[in-house]
Each structure stands twice: as C-alpha cells, then as structure tokens.
Amino acid sequence: MSYYNIKNNNLKINSKKSIDKLIYMWYNIIAIKKKSKGEYKMYTVEDLRREYSEAAEIVRKCNLPVKSVGEITLGLSPKATRHMGITEKRLDDYTIILNQPYASVAKKEDRMNTIIHEILHTLPGCMNHGENWKYAASIVRKKTGIEIERTGYNAEYQKYREENHIYKYAVVCEKCGKKSFFQRMSDVVKYPQLYKCMCGGNLHLI
Ligand SMILES: [Zn+2]
Ligand SMILES: [Zn+2]
C-alpha cells in the first residue's frame, strides 16, 4: 500500500483511515526507538494526575481559575489518533482525556503543552478555540513564555509529517520558498493567488 512508503517524497494522504494508520506507525517507530534505549514506559492515569497537577500549577500562577486534580476527571484513550488530547464537558463536569500512545512517546515538554491546552478548555467560555481560549493562551504565553499549540496536534509528529512530506495540501512561496502544509481544504489552498507570503511573495499550490 502506497501510504506505507514513507520514503516516497510525493506521498499524499487522502483519507482519514490512512492518516490514522500513519500515526499508528509513527507512534510505533518512536516507541521501538525508545524501547531500544530503555526509555519507554507506558503512560498511566497516575502519570496524568501528576502532570495535570504540575500543569495546573503553571496555569494557576497566571491567575486563571484552574480546577484542581480532584475537581476534574482524567482519563486516557488507547487509540492512536491525530488528537493528542480532548476535553469534554457535561453540565459543569469536565473530563480531560489524553491520547495514551502519544503520551507514552511524547517528550514531557510536548505533553505539558497538550495538558495546558486542555486545561484552558476548562476555563469559562473556552470550550472551542475562539477568542476566550486564545486570550487565555496569550496570558500563559506572556507570563510563562510557553506557546500553547492551538491545533492540539503533536509538534514532533507534525515535524515528522512535514519532513516526510505527509500532508494533503502544500502551498509554496515563489520568492522565499517557504512551504506551508495543510491537512484540510481551506481558502488559501483553494485560492493561493489571493494570498501573499509574509515576505510579500506570491503563493502557489504544489
Ligand atoms: Zn483544543
Ligand atoms: Zn515568502
């Protein structure tokens, strides 16, 4: 199957199923590497409780109304998907679920980023990535220097995907050569001629 051939530079992924397979494969590659170095340990809910407390402390220092570990439900999802974490709200109860394969191979720094990302969803009016969530993320950035990723995708995986040309759409700048990758159809993918690169160059789809 062609999508397994990560050496193929023109690889383009076009179904959710094949993306999930790639992610699963990616986690396995990292897990095997870590296992060979004796660094691998399956991430547990206990680990999450500990790291949630640490992350909550960081958010609390930013004067944001964060819930303590006893006021929130924490869980892990065993399936390898693109989402590194997810927050669910039922009435006033919040549940944060981390992707276990991701959490088991990610660097602590990336995992903390994901946990803080999810904590920000538990703040009032922050369930989506709208203005409130962005404002909270900007407070965290100003106070701690931590740039919370908006996508909820893993930075390492993102890098892996870009290095291996695993993406659905790519737009390149004619002037500086900067490439931007997109997983979904968006206006810039549809009408690159209507947009400019930061450097002022014209964009086109590749
Ligand atoms: Zn989110
Ligand atoms: Zn440019």
Image (tube, rainbow, N blue to C red):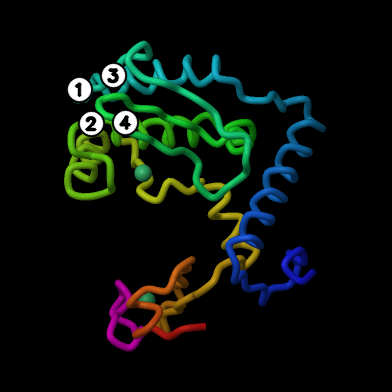
The structure residue drawn at horizontal position 74% and vertical position 45%, both measured from the top left corner, is 29
Q: Looking at this view, is 80 or 31 the one in front?
A: 80
The structure residue drawn at horizontal position 20% and vertical position 22%, both measured from the top left corner, is 65
Residue beneath disc 4? 90
Quarter of the image where the N terminus is located:
bottom right
Residue beneath disc 1? 65
Q: Amino acid at mark 2?
A: Leu
Label 1 CA crowd tier, 10 Å (few <14, some 14–19, many 20+): some
Q: Nearer the N terminus, badge 1 or badge 2?
A: 1
> What secondary structure is marked by label 1?
loop
- Between the C-alphas of marks 1 and 3, the distance is 7 Å
Residue beneath disc 2? 123
> What secondary structure is marked by label 3?
loop
Above or below, 187 relative to 17: below
Across and down, in percent, residue 194 comes to 28, 86
Determine which quarter of the picture holds residue 122: top left
Q: Looking at this view, is 88 or 98 the one in front?
A: 88
Across and down, in percent, residue 20 comes to 63, 54
The structure residue drawn at horizontal position 17% and vertical position 48%, both measured from the top left corner, is 131
- Between the C-alphas of marks 3 and 2, the distance is 9 Å
Task: Kindly check if marks 1 and 3 are in contact, taking CB atoms under 8 A apart as contact.
Answer: yes
> What secondary structure is marked by label 4?
strand
| Nearer to us: label 3 or label 4 | 4
The structure residue drawn at horizontal position 41% and vertical position 21%, both measured from the top left corner, is 73
Across and down, in percent, residue 61 comes to 24, 20
Question: Which quadrant contains ligand 1?
Answer: top left
| Nearer to us: label 2 or label 4 | 4
Residue beneath disc 3? 67
Q: What residue occupies the far front of the structure in this picture? A: 91
Task: Kindly check if marks 1 and 2 are in contact, taking CB atoms under 8 A apart as contact.
Answer: yes
Q: Amino acid at mark 4?
A: Arg
